[in-house]
Amino acid sequence: MLSTFSSSISALLDARAEGYTLPAGLYTREDVFGADLDVFYRNHWIYIGLECDVPEPGDATVIDIGSTSLIVLRDDDDNIQVVHNVCRHRGSRLLDAGPTVISKLVCPYHQWTYELSGELVYAPHMGTNFDKSCRNLKTVNFKSIGGLIYVCLSDTPPQDIANLEAVMEERLAPYDIRNAKVAYQTDVIEKGNWKLTIENNRECYHCAANHPELCVSFVEQDFGYDADTLSQEDRAEAEEYQRLYEQRIKAWEAGGYPSAPVEQLAGHATNFRTQRLIISGKGESQTADTTAASAKLLGKMSRKDLGDTHLWGHNSWNHFMGDHAVTSMVIPLSANRTLVRTKWLVHKDAIEGVDYELAKLTSVWIATTDQDGELVGRSHLGVEDPAYEPGPYSPFTEGQLDNFATWYVERMRAHGY
Ligand code: FES
Ligand code: FE
């Protein structure tokens, strides 16, 4: 059996059949988990947070990815810095996980002290010949794309992030996410492998039965459906949405808002897809009644009818709407535990209780994220069962999962597995 410990990771990758889910061991084995962290979280670009997580000089936050700990901070010149959370003396962690405010980075162990730029400025009792300049904090390759911070822990990061940057800087510009405000954040630990989390996010096959709150504003568009299996009424509705979607895309594009799907996947290290989706009902926002949750629109937005700019990566999904944005990142904790961190963003000057109510802003995606966590947990339990064997993806609604699984195998191969 391929999920047993004796088969190599390479044999598991060989066993993956196109159109089917992955062999069990690729979701469940600890050695595969280690390989995944190395390939997808060390050697690819990953989304770890936002510029507006650290809005003021001295704001810092710590993000842990496997055994790596990163400090994201805003320095005294208002620049974002990402440095390793490892003292250059004897390696102590400098800061604990989570947000904080600092004027300098002082190691709690022997008080070596670093400027917010990472420069070592104080290291007592090291002798007159000690060269502090060789002991600055190690920096991390990062890019802020429209205010979203991506890092790559490799010394040779994939260059094809340039395409994501070119597409999304333009698409995100009107939302001014760099200067947004994080109104709320949740951490959900899903009891499943990170690839099940991503697969679950890339289809809405499960939405009608599981996401009553989301389905008020979110409809299948351009994801495909099998018209033959729909009732006449549902087929008419699906066709109407498809017509509306195509019409809106044309109108938005003509109005200067890039909206058509752009995807980079097979043959590339950096995996992303973006498209502007329509919001049903009143069409403004993913809220319980589909109207805007915040009276102050994001950034330079002047319209609420620009749908939902959706962006997926291999460890994130995001929705940018006129009045707010919802952004989720996926950090694997173990083979069967995955952190999903979700943030709700509003205009930086929007005031809770005046411009928006937190319950209206967050209710749809809090419910949806909890429901998805439950589904991923169920899915992982089934995959761990010896009776599991890879199952067929729907050619109509799960094509993106098939593409993701194929990309996963391709990237593992590219890294020598
Ligand atoms: Fe940081 Fe010694 S380990 S000062
Ligand atoms: Fe879902």
Image (spheres, rainbow, N blue to C red):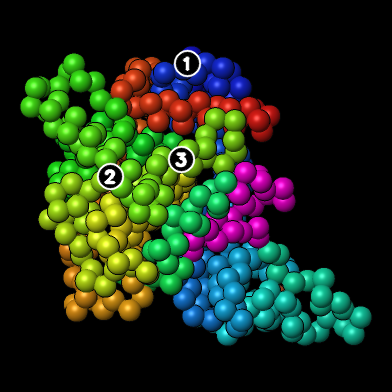
Label 3 – label 2 distance at C-alpha: 16 Å
Residue under numbered circle 2: 248
**Foreground residue, 76 or 62?**
76
Label 3 – label 1 distance at C-alpha: 26 Å
Is residue 121 covered in magenta?
no
Q: Please report contact status of discs 3 and 1: CB closer than 8 Å, yes or no.
A: no
73 versus 332 height, above or below: below
Question: What range is drawn magenta here?
Answer: 140-162
Amino acid under disc 1: Ala
Amino acid under disc 2: Arg
| Residue for point 40% across, 54% down | 256
Mark 2 within 8 Å of ligand 2, using the beta carbon: no
Residue under numbered circle 1: 17
State the image coordinates of residue 371 (x, y, percent, origin top left). 23, 44
Count of labels shown?
3
Label 2 – label 1 distance at C-alpha: 37 Å
Label 3 packing within 10 angstroms: few (<14), some (14-19), many (20+): some
Dividing the picture into quarters, in which one does residue 105 lie?
Answer: bottom right
Q: Which residue is outermost to the front?
A: 254
236 versus 210 height, above or below: above
Sequence-first tag of 2 and 1: 1
Q: Please report contact status of discs 2 and 1: CB closer than 8 Å, yes or no.
A: no
Sequence-first tag of 3 and 2: 2
| Residue for point 18% across, 16% down | 228
State the image coordinates of residue 230 (x, y, percent, origin top left). 15, 22
Amino acid under disc 3: Val
Is residue 161 covered in magenta?
yes
Q: Secondary structure at mark 2?
A: helix
Q: Quick one: quadrant of the C terminus? A: top right
Q: Secondary structure at mark 3?
A: strand
